[in-house]
């Protein structure tokens, strides 16, 4: 199965006015986020770090699953790999190096997984990525048991402030890369694959390689986010690092927000992180239950997410003022 | 050396042989017509050449090079382009971007965006779609979508062009225009293989005709020779009774 | 020698249960084209229900099969008619689009079912004693033999159902070619819903049987889903008999690996899976 969630996109027209508005909003948001630590308490900082983390995961997920139409459930695996790489090398290398290392390992493993599964039909990919988090967890557990004889690892922690800036940096990087790709020749290849894979292949696009590359690229950011989070805890073991929820929540955030643009996942991440904060401690079961329902309802009734709904409403409002063409 | 050559090409699905032991060749500058009743294996043969499918056995070579097991994108980059019986455009992208995919990823060295755009517009002009270049491809009429496919194929700078039932559903005027366009393409140096059911058209412009039936090649020759062939007439008699063109 | 006998019997039993579970998933994907990643959760529901009934109402677990199976079948039937039918309508005829959407929707379903179960039954591990006395000669617990007998009977009954009954043939026809089946007078929507329900019912029955043999917990589902998916690929996507054979094979492999090194079982599954994807993705009986 080629799992294709086809998002009806308007033909990309470079409306100068709209573009500069987006750019302005982004710059303002960037500056605000940069200055936040001067103005607030630790709690808000932690919350923002969480939001930024989910933004990274959701945007990275959309980076791959959006244009290609292949539903990846591997987010938790790469995120967990990032956490574990940071745990293993914690103390031996600097904090920035940890992040880069995690990204690299995530990239390499994703290359392997992608090369293996993306040349086959989509359903094999879906099945493989679904169980991947379980597999990676098991492999690491076995290696730790047999080879390194460790049971969990202690991590050198970084301050809330450092964590915030690191997460902010990676989030900005993720968004910038995503935007650059969309506008590039490579992004056109991706979109073409998503719209009609066979036609893309016959027009000279190396479909498998294009898919594998974006899959590996998205894994880099997921792993980086994991590495940063690892330094916010003192102790990491495979059970802690690998959690299917980290595949699940970014998907819901992206779908709810809307996969057609990069704004959707950002909105979704912000919204649901906040809700999670409220419900997490005492009502985590209810939280996950609600999120499950939200996903189902979003797929059924909001295929283009909130952003899509708003766009539709906006078009209706605008269209109503014009004379019929 | 033939431009394209197939030796004993076969393809089966389960027990059914869609193409069985077909040998053929196409020389540079020719227009070759591929005809046969429905289900004869014509589109399957195209699929085998363009690597939509892999042959069960046999060999296909292009300019002397074995292309039997190459993936579709490599076939395109070597210089073989095709259109599809059921149109396969990128529906949400504007017309010009559809064609730019061809000019960006087709044969030849990597081109910049400006050059790719120029080539795309050139191709669109050839098929007379330039005035619709910003319309989403999915909004076009079927005839225009077919033209779009041709433009995209042309943008990949092919030496060999496979046209699959380009004229199906066209009016008499449109058919005449298409025929003129095809001859223009040949004048530019592009070799063409066309699958058609519109007999007058294909008989008129083809240099050579290959006839398939039930997966096998049953006749080959000039249009005049093929039209006289008793085998071909027999194979088509039933189809003509059913009102086929 | 004892170890060997134990491996064979338990391997056969586990294989049979894997086969049940995988046939269920194969019905859902092969016919209804739903990659139900929530499949394992219904195994869990069957297991937890049976445990709960045993502990609170003293219901014989074998009798509870008659409750969990049909009850979950109805749930599946209704679920398909509402959720997946709805998805079919919004997929505009594209099978690929439907498959993607239904997989994600099943992902949501996974979280719904798992967390409802957690709210109702909590997160701790539960087990109960039933027929645990061993048959002296072979030193095998009776519950294993009984479960094995049930699995074999169920498998045989299912096979007969698929090959002999009208509904069974309709199911096989729909798996091969839904459009043509529809044209032949098969009420395709009802068949799809029945298949989905049957798949879920089989999962619940497997869960009930499992609860007799192993401890159950509300987070047990995921592992079985992964196994079922690997088996379905192993047997060949869309082939129900393939899932049957694949399940038994994998069950044996699982038992052998568990005997030597239990923590390696998931890895062993994936090694087989990877080898399969590299060498013969079509699976044993794949078209």
Image: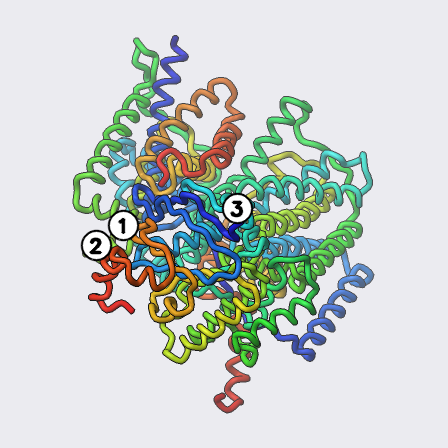
Q: Tell me the residue that label 2 is attached to.
A: C186
Tell me what residue is drawn at x 34 percent, y 50 percent.
Answer: B217
Tell me what residue is drawn at x 34 percent, y 39 percent.
Answer: C203
Q: Tell me the residue that label 1 is attached to.
A: C174
Residue A29 seen: yes
Vertical arrangement, residue B225 with respect to residue A310, above or below: above
Q: Which of B19 and C68 lies nearest the eye of the viewer? A: B19
Asked if the residues shown at circle 2 and circle 1 are in contact, with their CB atoms under 8 angstroms apart, the answer is yes
Give the SS element for disc 3: loop
How far apart marks 2 and 1 lie (CA) works out to 8 Å
From the image, state whether disc 3 or disc 2 is nearer to you.
3
Q: Tell me the residue that label 3 is attached to.
A: B67
Position of C271 compared to A242: left or right? left
Chosen colour scheme: rainbow
Position of B47 compared to C75: left or right? right
Tell me what residue is drawn at x 26 percent, y 55 percent.
Answer: B231
Give the SS element for disc 2: loop
Residue A306 seen: no
Give the SS element for disc 1: helix
- Residue closest to the far bottom: A323
Residue C187 percent across, percent down from the top left? 22, 56
Residue B156 percent across, percent down from the top left? 58, 62
Q: Which of B180 and A287 lies nearest the eye of the viewer? A: B180
How busy is the neighbourhood of tag 1: few (under 14 within 10 Å), some, or many (20 plus)? many
Position of B4 compared to A261: left or right? left
Residue A92 falls in image quadrant:
top right
From the image, state whether disc 3 or disc 1 is nearer to you.
3
Q: Which of C87 and B213 lies nearest the eye of the viewer? A: B213
Tell me what residue is drawn at x 75 percent, y 53 percent.
Answer: A164
């Amino acid at each position: 199965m080629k799992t294709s969630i086809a998002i009806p996109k308007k033909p990309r027209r470079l409306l100068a006015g709209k573009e500069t508005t987006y750019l302005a909003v982004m710059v303002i948001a960037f500056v605000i986020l940069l200055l936040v630590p001067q103005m607030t308490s630790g709690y808000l900082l932690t919350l923002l770090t969480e939001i930024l983390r989910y933004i990274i995961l959701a945007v990275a997920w959309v980076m791959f699953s959006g244009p290609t139409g292949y539903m990846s459930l591997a987010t938790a695996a790469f995120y967990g790999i990032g956490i574990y790489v940071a745990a293993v090398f914690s103390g031996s290398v600097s904090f920035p190096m940890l992040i880069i290392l995690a990204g690299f390992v995530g990239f390499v493993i994703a290359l392997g997984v992608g090369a293996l599964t993306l040349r086959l039909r989509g359903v094999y990919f879906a099945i493989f990525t679904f169980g991947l988090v379980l597999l990676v967890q098991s492999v690491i557990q076995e290696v730790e048991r047999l080879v390194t004889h460790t049971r969990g690892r202690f991590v050198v922690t970084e301050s809330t402030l450092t964590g915030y800036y690191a997460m902010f940096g990676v989030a900005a990087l993720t968004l910038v890369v995503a935007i650059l790709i969309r506008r590039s020749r490579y992004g056109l290849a991706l979109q073409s694959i998503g719209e009609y894979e066979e036609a893309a292949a016959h027009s000279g696009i190396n479909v498998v390689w294009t898919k594998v590359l974006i899959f590996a690229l998205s894994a880099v950011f997921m792993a980086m986010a994991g590495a940063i989070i690892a330094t916010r805890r003192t102790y990491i073991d495979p059970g802690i690092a690998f959690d299917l929820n980290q595949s699940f929540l970014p998907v819901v955030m992206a779908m709810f927000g809307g996969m057609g643009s990069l704004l959707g996942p950002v909105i979704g991440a912000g919204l649901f992180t906040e809700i999670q904060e409220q419900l997490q401690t005492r009502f985590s079961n209810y939280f996950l239950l609600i999120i499950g329902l939200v996903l189902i309802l979003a797929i059924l009734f909001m295929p283009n997410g909130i952003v899509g709904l708003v766009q539709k409403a906006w078009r209706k409002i605008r269209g109503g003022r014009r004379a019929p063409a | 050396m033939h431009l394209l050559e197939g030796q004993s090409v076969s393809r089966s699905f389960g027990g059914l042989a869609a193409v069985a032991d077909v040998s053929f060749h196409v020389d540079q500058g020719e227009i070759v017509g591929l005809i046969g009743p429905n289900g004869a294996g014509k589109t399957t043969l195209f699929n085998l050449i363009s690597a939509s499918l892999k042959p069960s056995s046999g060999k296909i070579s292009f300019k002397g090079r074995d292309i039997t097991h190459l993936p579709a994108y490599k076939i395109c980059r070597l210089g073989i382009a095709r259109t599809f019986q059921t149109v396969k455009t990128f529906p949400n992208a504007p017309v010009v971007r559809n064609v730019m995919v061809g000019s960006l990823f087709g044969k030849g060295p990597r081109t910049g965006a400006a050059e790719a755009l120029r080539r795309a517009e050139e191709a669109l002009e050839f098929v007379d779609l330039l005035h619709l270049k910003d319309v989403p491809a999915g909004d076009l009429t079927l005839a225009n979508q077919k033209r779009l496919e041709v433009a995209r194929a042309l943008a990949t700078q092919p030496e060999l062009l496979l046209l699959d039932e380009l004229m199906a559903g066209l009016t008499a005027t449109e058919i005449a225009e298409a025929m003129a366009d095809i001859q223009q393409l040949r004048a530019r140096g592009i070799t063409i293989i066309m699958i058609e059911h519109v007999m007058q058209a294909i008989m008129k412009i083809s240099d050579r005709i290959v006839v398939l039936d039930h997966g096998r090649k049953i006749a080959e020759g000039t249009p005049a020779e093929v039209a006289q062939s008793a085998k071909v007439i027999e194979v088509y008699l039933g189809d003509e009774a059913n009102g086929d063109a | 020698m004892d170890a060997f006998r134990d491996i064979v019997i338990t391997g056969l039993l586990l294989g049979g249960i894997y086969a049940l579970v995988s046939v269920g998933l194969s019905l859902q994907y092969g016919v209804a084209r739903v990659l139900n990643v929530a499949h394992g959760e219904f195994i869990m529901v069957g297991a937890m229900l049976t445990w709960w009934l045993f502990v609170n109402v003293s219901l014989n677990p074998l009798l509870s099969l008659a409750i969990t199976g049909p009850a979950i079948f109805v749930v599946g039937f209704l679920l398909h008619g509402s959720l997946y039918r709805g998805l079919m309508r919004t997929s505009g005829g594209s099978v690929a689009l439907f498959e993607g959407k239904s997989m994600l929707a099943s992902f949501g379903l996974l979280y719904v079912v798992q967390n409802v179960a957690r709210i109702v039954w909590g997160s701790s591990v539960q087990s109960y004693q039933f027929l645990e006395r061993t048959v002296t000669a072979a030193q095998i617990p009776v519950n294993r033999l009984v479960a094995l007998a049930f699995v074999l009977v169920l498998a045989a009954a299912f096979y007969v159902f698929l090959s002999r009954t009208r509904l069974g043939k309709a199911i096989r026809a729909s798996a091969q070619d839904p459009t043509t089946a529809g044209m032949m007078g098969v009420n395709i929507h009802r068949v799809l819903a029945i298949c989905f329900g049957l798949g879920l019912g089989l999962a619940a029955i497997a869960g009930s049987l499992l609860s007799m043999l192993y401890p159950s917990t509300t987070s047990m589902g995921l592992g079985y889903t992964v196994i079922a998916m690997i088996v379905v690929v192993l047997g060949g996507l869309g082939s129900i008999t393939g899932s049957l054979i694949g399940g038994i094979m994998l069950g044996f492999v699982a038992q052998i690996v568990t005997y030597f090194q239990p923590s390696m079982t998931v890895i062993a599954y994936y090694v087989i899976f990877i080898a399969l994807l590299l060498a013969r993705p079509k699976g044993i009986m794949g078209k």
